[in-house]
Image: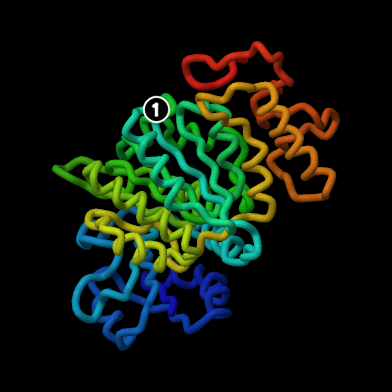
Amino acid sequence: MWAALGPPALLEMLVPLRDEHARWGETRLVPGGQSDIRNVVRSFADRRVNLLVIEAPGEGSGRSGYASPFLEGASYDSVLLGWLQLGPPELAAYVDRAVAISRRRHDEPTTVVLLAPREQRYLALLDQVERFASSPTMKLLRWSAERIRRAPLIDALRLGAGAVLYCGHGNASGWFAYGGINIDHLCSGEPWLHDQTGALMFSLSCSTGLGAGRAAGAEIRRGLADQMIARGIAGAVLAPSGDTAHENSRLLAKGLAHALGLGCVRLSDILAKATFEGGSLEGYAVIGDPGLCAASANGAALRGASVFAPAAGEQNLAAARDACADIATAGVRAGRVCPLGFVSPRRPSKFYHPGRGSGFQRLPQSSTMDDQGSIPK
């Protein structure tokens, strides 16, 4: 079951999203506020529910009052809460985007992007995550900081992934890896299109899920997760509102990867399975629609495969780059959707990132990686 709770004027804007979810089961729009959550849940008679809580902009978020995305208590452990705090224009845009994500075809491979800093413990964690997430129905893309720099990564993230997993340091303003990534970096080009949005984002980084509000008389700006939702980078984000312990992040990352590798696609199923692996969701919240799935946009796997992000030990970088260009060229010739422009139509052997003004040419065999793990321009 899917339901939304919030102010009547904002709930009316959710009608298209409600109708989309109604294709798969019962739905409700319930007028009310944060104080009504438990009473509303009781009326669902212990059914499994994805409950989207709409909060009026300018007010403090109530998500900090809940220890976990799953509503706790004997009758509430099957309820997954999601939070949205957007003004009317942003909410209208979000509804359109969430409907588009819900309509993605599930016969596409689930494209999962792995992100992390160059710190050895996080690289070792990604090694484990790759083993846990291995699946014939999944396209796994490792774009950690020793493989790709910030500018090409920002462009590459517009592939329309089913899920993106970031394990590393950060705060409410952004991620520390790749020289720092905040919302200004992510939105430095054109607005994100619906088929560029990542369906699910798992940001295992301190305070990235912090909600707007006031503390000690000072205004708290909304954190990275809320900004990702507002600007179209993700459909739903799992993120902590405070500090996280590395050991729990490690267990949670492996649990999330295992769930995706086993074929879980619904966010509620992914999170439930992740906790069975020993990770805790305490201190985390879901920002966005909790009823979304890890559904990739058409052509996402192809676009991801055409991104040049070689392992540090890659011996033949020119051949690796040519392989990326060939994959992209073949996709264009086959008529696959490639809206990010990973291949120049005029020069199909030329791999480039849109909006950066220069392409990456085929390189001589002597080309080497720089200290950032990328080919120098």
| Whether residue 46 is situated above or below residue 302 in the rendered picture | below
Q: Along the line of sight, which residue is nearer the eye, 27 or 327? A: 327
> Residue 202: x percent and y percent?
40, 50
Mark 1 surroundings within 10 Å by alpha-carbon count, few (fewer than 14), some (14 through 19), many (20 or more): some
> Residue 254: x percent and y percent?
36, 51
> Residue 101: x percent and y percent?
58, 61
From this viewpoint, which residue is outermost toward the top? 366
What residue appears at the point 62 percent right and 31 percent down from the top-left corner?
308
Asked whether, in this view, residue 278 is left or right of residue 229, the answer is left
Answer yes or no: is residue 322 visible.
yes
- Quarter of the figure with residue 374: top right
- Residue carrying label 1: 118
- Quarter of the figure with residue 85: bottom left
What residue appears at the point 47 percent right and 67 percent down from the top-left corner?
266
What residue appears at the point 68 percent right and 46 percent down from the top-left corner?
302
| Whether residue 109 is situated above or below residue 350 in the rendered picture | below
